[in-house]
Image: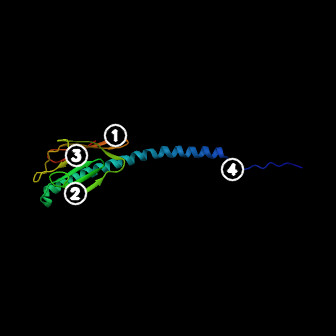
Amino acid sequence: MSATCQRQSGLTLLESLIGLTIIMILAGVAIWPFRALRDEQLLKGAVEDVLSVLNNARAQTLAGSAQSQYGVHFENDTITLFRGDMYPGVTEQIITLPPRVVFGAISLAGGGAEVVFQRLTGATTQTGSVVVELASDATKRRVVEIYSSGLINETP
């Protein structure tokens, strides 16, 4: 009687776990740069929203829309476009920042959190800056500068 050895083919549990671990490590390394890119795009989009609302308020004031001044109020995670010479006026638009983006600092003349543009000139007395940053990493930030002329500029 001769004994025959049967050789089984396939992977052992240990080999499967090692392979799965290698794949997970490679996936983690590959995904990390995309997370940073996503965060940068969220920050960029939030700054564009701030610039857009500020420019819209100034443009509507200069155009004499509703025979009124327009302004922008910053609060926690929202940007409010309002009509009137002070906040709260008539709310025209509210934009909510993305979940991972916050206002790091709002430093406006007079200590308030709103900018109101003057009719005919588009100027403002609420000069200063608004810092938009990632909630998880305050080093990733953008600064929106507001000048007395009413012009707005983004600085890195």
Cα separation, mark 1 vs mark 2, equals 30 Å
The reply to whether discs 1 and 4 touch (Cβ–Cβ < 8 Å) is no
In terms of sequence position, does the residue under pointer 4 or pointer 3 come before the other?
4
Which residue is under mark 4?
10
| Residue 91 numbered tag | 2
Q: Position of residue 62 (x, y in %)?
A: 13, 55
In x, y percent, where is residue 110?
17, 41
Task: In the rendered structure, find residue 138 and report the number of the disc placed on it.
Answer: 1
Q: Residue furthest left?
A: 120
Furthest residue to the front? Answer: 88
> Which of disc 3 and disc 2 is earlier in sequence?
2
Q: Residue at x 17, y 43 (%)?
A: 127
Picture colour scheme: rainbow
Across and down, in percent, residue 39 comes to 37, 47
- The alpha-carbon separation of the residues under discs 4 and 3 comes to 66 Å
Q: Quadrant of residue 156?
A: top left
Q: Secondary structure at mark 1?
A: strand
Pointers 2 and 3 in contact (CB under 8 A)? Answer: no
Q: Which mark is residue 96?
A: none
Mark 3, residue position: 113
- Identify the amino acid type marked 4: Gly
64 or 1: which is nearer to us?
A: 64
Nearer to us of marks 1 and 4 is 1
Nearer-the-camera pick, 128 or 89: 89
